[in-house]
Amino acid sequence: MGSIQNDSSLAQEESLLQDEESRQYTGDGSVDFKGRPVLKQNTGNWKACPFILGNECCERLAYYGIAKNLVTYLTRKLHEGNVSAARNVTTWQGTCYLTPLIGAILADSYWGRYWTIAVFSAIYFLGMCTLTLSASVPVLKPADCFGSSCPPATPAQYTSFFFGLYLIALGTGGIKPCVSSFGADQFDDTDLQERIKKGSFFNWFYFSINIGALVSGTFIVWIQENVGWGIGFGIPTLFMGLAIGSFFLGTPLYRFQKPGGSPITRIFQVVVASFRKRHLVVPEDSSLLYETPDKRSAILGSRKLEHSDELRCLDRAAILSDAERKSGNYSNLWRLCTVTQVEELKTLIRMLPIWAAGIVFNSLYAQLSTLFVEQGTMMDTSISSFNIPPASLSSFDVISVIFWVPVYDRIIVPIARKFTGKERGFSELQRMGIGLFISIFSMLAAAIVEIKRLQLARELDLVDKPVAIPLSVFWQIPQYFLFGAAEVFTNVGQLEFFYDQSPDAMRSLCSALALLTTSLGNYLSSFILTVVTYFTTQGGNPGWIPADNLNKGHLDYFFWLLAGLSIVNMLVYIVSAKKYRKKKAS
């Protein structure tokens, strides 16, 4: 009897030791640089994050150091016309938000996030060097204007400049969708404490982006305008080099997630398999659907996903046919998929309505660099003898983000946690909804400023004169500051949502889709502007946004329209958010 008790106690001790040992390692399948299981205390967490945040801050400084003043370089140095320069800038920026799809697929399918960032950072740096040389080397640098005569840039000068510019666009494609996800990979999803810290990471990640943007929008732009473009491009190039150095320095501390194969292929496999079995009846008992018997998913680097009752037509892809049961051959993924693989596609489809809300939000964000600036040009921009460029008011949006991130992380979250009981204060969907709500007030503030501006124009009899109205441009600060607060809620919430809710082996792809909302938001803004201009200029009317004199127009109506659109978007979002069912991983 004593022997049995001793054996039992030994077994219990052994089990406890195994549990204790397993708790020392991450439970989300992450590995170290050499592919070995990683100890929590030695890797990841906030120990690894300073290198990633430093990389993002320096990379964003480099990017905005080019983007903020690119139109000025094209018009003043390459001697392009306003329309051509604006078209080249928007095309390049659109490309920068499309190439992340390339980087995301490579990261999720083959290379993993670390090596994708490394390879595309090298391409990015090469592009920055090429751009700096094109603005520094006499042969590659366009000739200056002589009076009103501006010699056009030579084909070689155009080629060198745009080659560098589009190498940067390609380089961003591997960095943008991977860095935030790679940073979040440093926190173990199976550990409650680390999960809470991961929410804080996204806040400080967005903070780092805006620190880089603030330095570029002030210091770098001033260098380009007052010292020279060679140095003005050279400093961002130096910071890109620092970004790469910061990233590689943290390598021994990083946690790595293994790539799980092409997500695009897996999506098509589910569609094809479910179509082939369209005549089969989906069983009521989901346990009859095919899934691997062991604990690990058949998809490398992914946990298993539990079955959901939505989109049951896709479940046909996981039905075992009689022929498959008899043969025992389950290897043809174009005929039979696991429940986890089917749930990957279901998860993506469920996320689409939430994703769509970001498009409308980003169409409002587009006004910060377009109509907000145009409104500012028709206001008093002077402080004593000094004139403020209206575009520089956008710095208040960045300052707002820098202000609100620590306030949200250190004050709002702890208070909200007491009331909601949620580990991050608000859920990702609640956080995004709050941001959508705040963005409405940014448009309302812009409309009120415009009403006051037009009222002064009528009182001073300046309606027919294309001149600035004696109303200080600083009245625009509230609309910028409000939108900065909206960004902290919506954009950071979107980063959290697309990381947490995306399938494990599709996180880079989902981050790329989130970035795509920025591009689509700009296209939506252009479409709305085109439609409004067409209908409001009928019958010879100047329209809401006249090309030559905003004093004749009604820009306030356009801001009211955007506020109304944002209200509709928020209401649709609330309905979608209430219906949304979170993924369940095991």
Image (tube, rainbow, N blue to C red):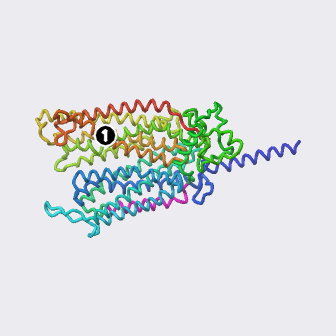
Residue 526: image location, x then y, percent: 30, 42
Q: Which residue is mark 1?
A: 527
Identify the residue at image location x=22%, y=35%.
544
In the displayed structure, 34 sits above or below 503; it is below
Identify the residue at image location x=38%, y=41%.
487
Q: Nearer the viewer, residue 23 or 274?
A: 274
Q: Nearer the viewer, residue 346 or 145?
A: 346
Q: Is residue 247 left or right of residue 583?
A: left
Identify the residue at image location x=69%, y=43%.
293
SS of the residue at dot 1? Answer: helix
- Image quadrant occupied by the N terminus: top right
By secondary structure, the bulk of the magenta-drawn segment is best described as helix
- Image quadrant occupied by the C terminus: top right
Residue 230: image location, x then y, percent: 29, 64
Residue 26: image location, x then y, percent: 61, 49
Total labels: the figure holds 1
Identify the residue at image location x=54%, y=36%.
582
In the displayed structure, 164 sits above or below 302; it is below
Q: Is residue 165 left or right of residue 84?
A: right
Q: Is residue 121 located in the magenta-colored stretch of the structure?
A: no
Q: In this picture, which residue range is highlighted in magenta?
A: 233-255
Residue 152: image location, x then y, percent: 21, 62
Looking at the rendered structure, the kind of residue marked 1 is Phe
In the displayed structure, 58 sits above or below 286; it is below
Q: Quadrant of residue 271?
A: top right
Q: Is residue 571 left or right of residue 285?
A: left
Q: Is residue 254 located in the magenta-colored stretch of the structure?
A: yes
